[in-house]
Image: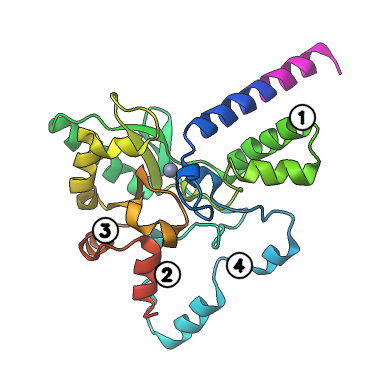
Amino acid sequence: MNGKMIVTLVVLLLSAAITAVGVLLTDYSQQVPVEIQSENSEEPPQKDNSEDEHESIQKEGQEQDEEESKVDLTDTWELLLANPDNPLPSDFTVETAVVQGNFKMDARVADAMKQMIVDAKADGVDLMICSAYRSIQRQQELFDAEVAVQMSYGKSKEEAERITATMIAVPGTSEHHTGLAADIVTPTQQTLDPAFATTSAGKWLLSHAAEYGFILRYPEDKQDITKIIYESWHYRYVGVEHAAAIKEANLCLEEYLEQLRGE
Ligand SMILES: [Zn+2]
């Protein structure tokens, strides 16, 4: 190993450690039932598991319903589901556009997000994006770096991957890969904390996000269904009509999709 390689390795390990500490600091999964995890720990490891190879994006039930109904309303990019049970294919790609700073989202929703930020500002509310599109490749890098850190503590590869999966979403399963989701904070509340809901920005979003096509993706009263802790900061684009319907009926995306499929 030459000096340059060592420096690179040290930088990688340091950034992984900082990421891990950041995730731990914002991990509220301890406060809710065990099966409900933080968004950053959405899923058990499914990489390198041959079973998952057979599990395409579409589930059996979905395919059957498609045969029965002539028009499948759930088959639209706006309603793309990415969760532990519905991982995106590893080659999933999406055209992105900048929405704020260096943060990018699906180019088809970028204007809606930018307009929402402008309109909030006009109401005296500062919306700060702190996470948006994240590629599966980038997630894999974060995941692998943390596995390396855990292995440097003497853990086996298997154990290191298991521990990492409790802190960092397994690549392919985070909604941030879709380009349709963003974590939003505000200058007075810059950490991912349920308290964001009590800020003027949190309240403004609850009132107005649907007008721009965004929904609060992981509501407090839907944790049993989403399997993700209450995230007052995570908003997801579904389109103005779907957002209005979801808000009106007080559903989460999983429930709404079931309803559309007539389940
Ligand atoms: Zn998020």
Q: Earlier in the sequence, mark 1 or mark 2?
A: 2
Q: Secondary structure at mark 2?
A: loop
Q: Position of residue 97 (x, y in %)?
A: 40, 39
Q: Secondary structure at mark 3?
A: helix
**CB atoms of marks 4 and 3 within 8 Å:** no
Q: Nearer the viewer, residue 42 or 47?
A: 42
Q: Which residue is mark 4?
A: 56
Q: Name the front one of labels 2 and 4.
A: 4
Left or right placement of residue 128 versus residue 139 in this view = left
Q: What is the CA distance from the residue labelled 2 to the residue labelled 4?
A: 15 Å
The quadrant of the picture showing ligand 1 is top left
Q: What is the CA distance from the residue labelled 3 to the residue labelled 2?
A: 16 Å
Q: Which mark is residue 164?
A: none
Q: Earlier in the sequence, mark 4 or mark 3?
A: 4
Number of other residues with Cα within 10 Å of mark 1, as a class: few under 14, some 14 to 19, many 20 or more: few
Q: What is the CA distance from the residue labelled 4 to the residue labelled 3?
A: 27 Å
Q: Name the front one of labels 3 and 2.
A: 3
Q: Secondary structure at mark 1?
A: loop
Q: Secondary structure at mark 4?
A: loop
Number of other residues with Cα within 10 Å of mark 2, as a class: few under 14, some 14 to 19, many 20 or more: few
Q: Position of residue 234 (x, y in %)?
A: 37, 44
Left or right placement of residue 41 versus residue 32 in this view = right
Q: Which residue is mark 3?
A: 243
> Residue 136 lies in magenta, yes or no?
no
Q: Which mark is residue 75?
A: 2
Q: Which mark is residue 153?
A: 1
Label 3 beta carbon within 8 A of ligand 1: no
State the extent of the magenta-drawn residues as a range: 1-12
